[in-house]
Image (cartoon, rainbow, N blue to C red):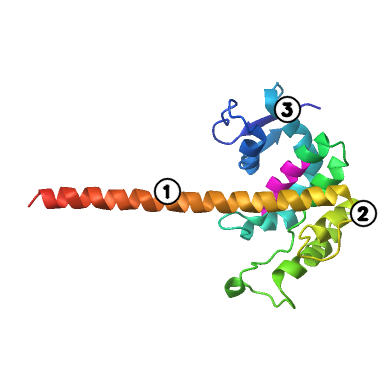
Amino acid sequence: MKFNLIKKNNLINENKEDIYTDIGLNIDSYIDDENVYGSIGKREHLAEFFDIIKDVISNDTVKQMKNYRQHCNTSCYKHCMQVAYFTYIACKKLKLDYISATRGAMLHDLFLYDWRKKYRNIDISGLHAFIHPRIALKNASEIFDLNDIEKDVIVKHMWPVTLSFPKYRESYIVTIMDKYSACLETYLYLKHKLQAKSFYRYAYIFLSMVFLGNF
């Protein structure tokens, strides 16, 4: 079955060199529509990606990840989808089990609470970094029939913070993509903040000059 993937706003510039990162950063702004057919060029791989996680992202419990922030201003839901997308690309190129890896990546942060201590509304025993993979695995296992790779992806995605080594190559890919996404999200957030500060600084100088010029 073909899917035409539609971005909610305008399509991203196809001429950008790193189209995978370009799409990955905006992955949650794409939708799949079975009723619209046609070629989308370089984005045809998105049809398979969304088909793999379709039942996952349509689940109400999984959708609750939209209510919790992960890194900076990125929700757990968007972060998981970014990691899943980058995992899909890498594992498919490496001829690994990209389906299991992608599905596991989409569920890797299904812990469903605000991990920031001052906003946390539940009691957890231990540091978030160490315990949230087990919580995510428990939550995911209650909803889906997970295979061994998916389970390992979820519970080991924080390696080497969690000392147990991943059992599968797919799990190592997810740990790398998780950290890549986290760094990317943080970098873009800080870049935006610095640009905003620069804008306000120059606006202040300009307005001050205009104000002083009237005297």
For marks 1 and 2, give the one nearer the viewer: 1
Q: Residue at horizontal 71%, vertical 52%?
A: 178
Distance Cα–Cα, label 3 vs label 1: 34 Å
Callout 3 crowding tier (Cα within 10 Å): few <14, some 14–19, many ≥20: some
Mark seen at residue 122: none
Front in this rendered view, residue 178 or 154:
178
Distance Cα–Cα, label 3 vs label 2: 29 Å
Task: Say whether residue 76 is left or right of residue 168.
Answer: left
- Count of numbered circles in the view: 3
Mark seen at residue 195: 1
Q: Residue at horizontal 17%, vertical 48%?
A: 210
| Tag 2: amino acid | Asp
* Residue contact between numbered discs 3 and 2, judged by CB atoms under 8 Å: no
Mark seen at residue 148: 2
Return the residue found at the far left: 215
Q: Residue at horizontal 76%, vertical 60%?
A: 158
Q: Which residue is mark 3?
A: 44
Quarter assignment of residue 32: top right
| Magenta residue check for 110 | no
What secondary structure is found at the residue carrying circle 1?
A: helix
Q: Residue at horizontal 15%, vertical 52%?
A: 211
* Residue contact between numbered discs 1 and 2, judged by CB atoms under 8 Å: no
Instruction: Tell me residue 170's x, y (percent).
Output: 85, 47
Quarter assignment of residue 61: bottom right
For marks 3 and 1, give the one nearer the viewer: 1
Q: In what quadrant of the picture does the N terminus appear?
A: top right
Q: Identify the main secondary structure in magenta.
A: helix
| 208 over 24 or under it: above or below | below
Q: Which of the marked residues, 3 or 2, is nearer the chain's N terminus? A: 3
Q: Which residues are magenta?
A: 77-88
Instruction: Tell me residue 57's x, y (percent).
Output: 74, 48
